[in-house]
Image (spheres, rainbow, N blue to C red):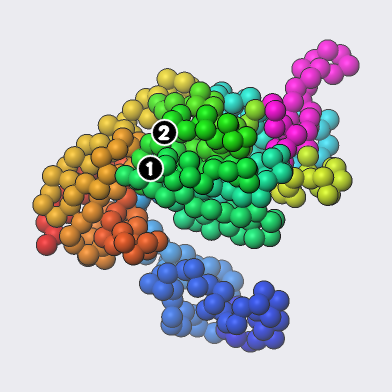
Amino acid sequence: MNHKYIPHTDSDIKEMLEKVKVSSIDGLFKEVPEEVKINKDYHLSAGLSEIEVENKLNDLSNMNNKDLVCFIGAGSYDHYIPSIIKHITSRSEFYTAYTPYQPEVSQGTLQYIFEFQTMMTDLTNMEVCNASMYDGATSCAESIMMAVSKTRRKKVLVSKALHPYTIETIKTYGHFNGYEIIMLENEAGLLDEKDLENKLNKEIACVVVSNPNFYGLIENPSNYVEKIHDNKSLLIMYVNPLSLGLLKTPGEIGADIVCGEAQPLGIALCYGGPYIGYICTTKKYIRNIPGRIVGQTTDEDGKRAFVLTLQAREQHIRRQRASSNICSNQSLNALAATVYMSVMGKQGLVDVCEQNVQKAHYAYEQITSLKTFEKVFDTPFFNEFLVKSTIDYKIIKEALLKENMIAGIHLGEFDSQYNNHIVFCVTEKRTKAEIDQLVQVLGGLK
């Protein structure tokens, strides 16, 4: 046995590694930063009972259970979550519900999925929404597959300002589904419109742009949506849905498909998941959308009822005609997002957005007034902003951690030309005192 209390034998591990074609356990976890790995013994005595082991591990966990002030975003955001969400989603009838294969006994599940779809279409100003997806990255990949299927074209233009992890995901999907990703350059942090014009041709299925983008900047798809449509290509917008409380909606811009990560709508950070992706589109593409669509009707007594209206996936139509084989939705998180939107209401969303903008811009002005930080782009942003520092990022990160604060994300991890460039995020949860403390710590560094 490899380690006490771990049931896998050496032969188990060897067989598993051979199956996934990875040479070692370290290779299996290469994406995990070295500094968070434990490279020593757990110091668990032999012969402990289950409850003793559990208590020991809980004690270790509690040593790290500190409430840190979060200034990191980049796809996962520390927003306020109304307590009603936890109370409703933890009710047993929702918590233990399974896929509504039997609609006649799943009316509650079908209704909240229907409400989720309705609210998401209202928020994005689109006509149709599916019953949710795994996360934002896979929703983007599935949106591209929709466009490729609809246009029968095999090339896709993608803005370099899309989240790097999302780019990795869509490249993986493209590798196995036969479409090619072509990257679009940036100009002042935004999609380079001249580069877009040069690369648009009759082989391009769609153009993918995120809003706000990975640098936190607000893109201008209205400037080039007609050129995309004149080329008979589709515009896919990857959108933070919370930002639509203030920003122009994809429907107003003329987007064909809208996708993204709905975690900002009342979903906890949870160390990176489970999250919830979404796809909205127009009726024109309704039969290309993956997953499920729930509709409402009336039963034989004339009462309002809910049904699974469309399921264009391989379990329900001929495999070769399915645009996707994704076969699940994030139902409990869809319920959480639905409760969040219903509790906040239209004005509540606007208020949250305004707080995000005001607090982020206050932090931006304070940080860039320091001698050791400077502005990078002079472009409107929502709740994230990019700054460049003359101080090494590791020094900044460690100094903030000592004060129980999490620094913004370091772009140098993704691109060496952005060494010591940091994207800070400020949500409505951050107080002026917390922002001032952040600035004070940064200002004291040399």
Dot 1: what SS?
strand
The amino acid type of the residue labelled 2 equals Asn
**Is 290 left, or right, of 218 in this rendering?**
right
Q: Mark 1 = which residue?
A: 190
Dot 2: what SS?
loop
In x, y percent, where is residue 294? 73, 30
Q: Is residue 18 above or below residue 62?
A: below
Residue 309 falls in image quadrant: top right
Query: Start and end of the magenta stretch?
Result: 283-311
Residue extending furthest top?
A: 302
In x, y percent, where is residue 64? 37, 63
In x, y percent, where is residue 96? 69, 44
The amino acid type of the residue labelled 1 equals Leu
Label number found at residue 250: none
Q: In this rendering, does residue 401 appear at all?
A: no
Residue at horizontal 56%, vertical 69%? 51
Q: Mark 2 = which residue?
A: 220
Image quarter where the C terminus lies is: bottom left
Closest to the observer: 158 or 412? 158
Lower sequence index among marks 2 and 1: 1
